[in-house]
Image (tube, grey):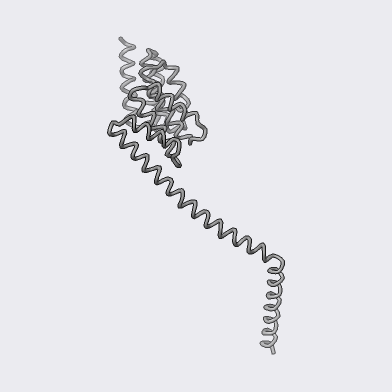
Amino acid sequence: MTNENDSFIREVNEELRSDQMKAIWTQYGLMIVAIAVAIVIGTAGYRGYVYWSGLQASASGDKFLTAMKLASDNKTDEALAAFAQLEKDGYGAYPVLARMRTATLKAATDPKAAVAELDAVASDTKVPDAVRDVARLRAGWLLIDTAPYADVSKEVEVLTDAQNPMRHSAREALGLSAFKNGDFKQATDWFQAIANDATTPVNVGNRARIMLDLLTSNAKG
């Protein structure tokens, strides 16, 4: 008897679930279909975008390598034209990479133009912060031989914070600029900051200690 009751209860429950599903489908069927279709379309769209994005990145990468080859072959004008085109229609990170390479090419013959290119990258809020910092650092190093200390400081002093991974190179640029401009006290301060930082790379630390020895000798002389 118990088995018959259990069987009857299961049949009733199944019937109730069936009726409930029919009611839900009657009320929400169109919405369920719409959601299912949206999920299918969304998935297809995402996969399509990923595929398209990959193609665009690959095409820009090929163009970038071509421009780099032109630069290495000393075909500077052609390389600059190729990088300029990438700046306009490149995909992903390639436009900003093209801007940086343009500055590098210009640095050999026109440092001022190169600094202007780098400053443009550094002030572009659409560019990742790390790339903007690299642009500032490169601009500062380009200015060491030709510009007053204030110009170099304007570019790189913001990078000398203890948490900035580029602080070592920024401090070295400032120390060299101060030395070249005859401000030996300022130069000593920056090179000493490098020597005192336990995280300073060995090669940068060695150069700083050489400069400190030189500055000490000059002071005694």
Instruction: Identify the residue shown where x is 38% and y is 32%.
Output: 81
Quadrant position of the N terminus in the picture: bottom right
Residue 56 visible in the current orientation: yes
Instruction: Identify the residue shown where x is 34% and y is 40%.
Output: 65
Residue 14 higher or lower than 201, as above or below = below
Residue 52, percent across and down? 46, 50
Q: In this view, does 66 lie to the left or right of 99?
A: left
Instruction: Identify the residue shown where x is 70% and y is 86%.
Output: 5
Residue 152 higher or lower than 134, as above or below = above
Q: Quadrant of residue 114?
A: top left
Residue 42, percent across and down? 56, 56
Q: In which quarter of the image is residue 167?
A: top left
- 83 or 200: which is nearer to us? 83
Q: In which quarter of the image is residue 79?
A: top left
Residue 18 higher or lower than 191, as above or below = below
Quadrant position of the C terminus in the picture: top left
Residue 191 visible in the current orientation: no
Residue 5 higher or lower than 191, as above or below = below
